[in-house]
Amino acid sequence: MKIPFVSFKPMEKELDKDLRAAFERVYTRSWYIEGVEDEQFEKAFAEYCGTKYCIGVGNGLDALMLALKALGIGVGDEVIVPANTFIATALAVTYTGATPVLVDPDLKTFNINPVLIENAITDRTKAIMPVHLYGQPCDMDPIVEIAKKHNLFIIEDCAQAHGATYKGKKIGSFGNVAGFSFYPGKNLGALGDAGATVCSNEETAKKVRAFGNYGSDYKYHHIYVGNNSRLDEMQAAFLLVKLNHLDRMNEARRNIANKYLEGITNPKVIKPFIPDYANPVWHIFGIRTEDRKGLERYLNNKGIGTNKHYPIPVHLQECYKNLGYHKGDFPNAEIISETELSLPMYYGMTDEEINYVIDAINTWV
């Protein structure tokens, strides 16, 4: 049996008629930037997240970077980010001129460890950027408490966690602002690059929109040195179609995850941990094993696609040598980077496919 790491085919087959109708609607209208589709999606996604405002942008990295710029973060400032994340989190900080300051994750949740955050705060710290990695919500109560104590902004990186909840409340609504990616592989994915910034502060929302539109508040009037990052009408139309099915499709991913959690019994495999406060959406189902290379080879030979998230932690990336970090500085991030293996996880996986993956893992010696 061949099981890819990810497949869009079941979802696209199911939504084919509606996605084609969305394309025809936009194509017939001949209006491709900042139109009715974008307006409707922004309204719907803000309501979904429990925020007042949503600003569609070009991608998830821009969603974070524009959020930081809107909060006035720049040269000389520091932003606390987890050492275990996709590099876009740190890049967003760097692009503003500020400096990312890393904090080791909790080894059980893979997310930033709130206990370690205060040790990283200096007189230059302006914000904390928690990442809801793999669709698993961070422990937000202590993070919010620390931010209030030290008068810091919170920018949530929600790129992998569309629809996840913390104590029953949607992520993206805990901080001052949040960034989402709609890269095609996300739980809510466009058919190309796209992203959004959400918040409930009107001034912040206006600044994000202006920064993403060449720094302009109205045509040919530029109040900031801005960027060109806007959600186009075609992607907005596709996303609006998919948003109507997001909760149902997230529930299907939870069903797959529950079967993995119940079925995988190999003692050499460490399964994901779900805290009581979290209802994850399983963008990634990441296990850990000391012999990752061996398990990866075994599964691939059986036709099972896998991936690694992420094999080189941020502090060991060549582009961040200037931060002065060294191997051993963030031990948990390094352990995760060396032992994590991501299993197939996508809407439309059949029970036969799920059981095939489970049996393969359990028979691995």
Image (cartoon, rainbow, N blue to C red):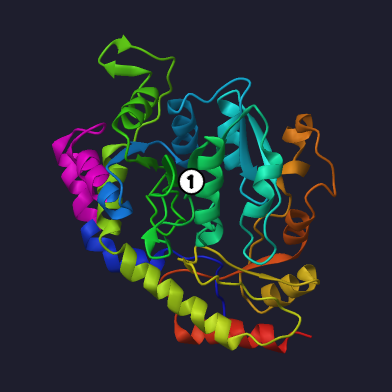
Whether the magenta-drawn stretch holds residue 39 is answered as yes
Is residue 141 visible in the rendered image? The answer is yes
* Residue that appears at 69% across and 50% down: 116
User: What's the magenta bit mostly, secondary-structure-wise?
Assistant: helix
The residue carrying mark 1 is 156
Percent coordinates x, y for residue 79 in the rendering: 60, 35
Position of the N terminus, as image quadrant, is bottom right
The quarter holding residue 269 reads: bottom right
Residue 334, above or below 67: below
Residue farthest to the front, as pictured: 149
For the residue pair 150 and 186, the one nearer the viewer reads as 150
Residue 69, above or below 356: above
Position of the C terminus, as image quadrant, is bottom right
User: Label 1 neighbourhood size at 10 Å, few (<14), some (14-19), many (20+)?
Assistant: many
For the residue pair 242 and 96, the one nearer the viewer reads as 96
Q: Is residue 252 left or right of residue 236?
A: right
Magenta stretch, residue numbers? 19-44
Question: Disc 1 marks which amino acid?
Answer: Glu
